[in-house]
Amino acid sequence: MTAGKTHLMRWMRLYAGGYDLSGDARTFGTLLNNYVDVDLTGWSDAAKNYLAGGGRATGLQGFQALANDTAARAFAVLKEPDQQIPVSLLFGGAAEPTYTDPAYLLGAVQMSAPMGWDGGAAALTADFMPDAREEDANSGNPWGVVLYPATSIAVTTNGTVVDNLAASTIGAHANLHITATASGVWSLLIQASTTGAFGGEETTLLTFTPNGSAVTAEHISVAGTIPRYTRFRAVRTSGTTTFLATLARN
């Protein structure tokens, strides 16, 4: 991101559920990624000695968007809090986000939807926090990469191979966003390879449930070893569909 660090806001892209809300975005707040202390108020010294440290805090706070009430735009999508809505925030640096660019991803629940006025414009502010119904022990690290940038495709497609520099051993999680479709029927998966060849030695790391037939999103996770190289693969049966995928390893 260094070369384009002064243009991050311009090239940020936010996907909430099956919708690209980037065009309505005004500003972003905080991307949480820290450990929190355990509240020890009232505990005896003996009990404190047996307590582990606090949990990891993640979440996207203070996403402000124009209150655009057009179908599939910010107000229409975010007006109701307490909804399961996988979120991926992409950082393009100096251009549209593409393969290996940083991504912050959550299997989220929307926690707020207050609206006010900012500079004369009606603006809606939303917070997204980890959803216990979607996230698990393999969803700890929110920082990952763009595995497949938002692209409309009409043929079986393999994404660019992403080199994660080394294997990891404690799982990963991923978001799939389907933002448009025309009679799409697909098999959608993330593959992994120890060599990067993807010549038959690759394995299927994750398989998404959505088949491309509807605008939607999904957050899924996997335990265990994650090989060094990964890629997104979309196997077509019919139709034209726009996909976006992000992946974070722990």
Image (cartoon, rainbow, N blue to C red):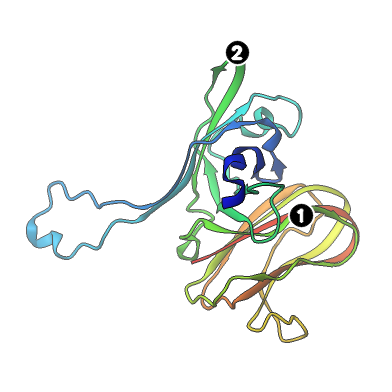
Give the amino acid at mark 1. Phe
From what the image shows, is residue 137 above or below residue 89?
below
Provide residue 158's location: percent of width, then percent of height: 80, 69
Give the amino acid at mark 2. Gly
**Badge 1: residue crowd in 10 Å (few <14, some 14–19, many ≥20):** many
First-in-chain label (2 vs 1): 2
Question: Do the residues under discs 2 and 1 have CB atoms within 8 angstroms?
Answer: no
Residue lying furthest left in this view?
Answer: 45
Q: Tell me, yes or no, if residue 46 can be seen here.
A: yes
Provide residue 1's location: percent of width, then percent of height: 58, 52
Res 213 label: none
Provide residue 219's location: percent of width, then percent of height: 61, 57
Asked whether, in this view, residue 94 is left or right of residue 30, the answer is: right
Q: Tell me, yes or no, if residue 1 can be seen here.
A: no
**Badge 2: residue crowd in 10 Å (few <14, some 14–19, many ≥20):** few
Q: Quick one: SS at disc 1?
A: strand
The residue where tag 2 is placed is: 120
The residue where tag 1 is placed is: 243
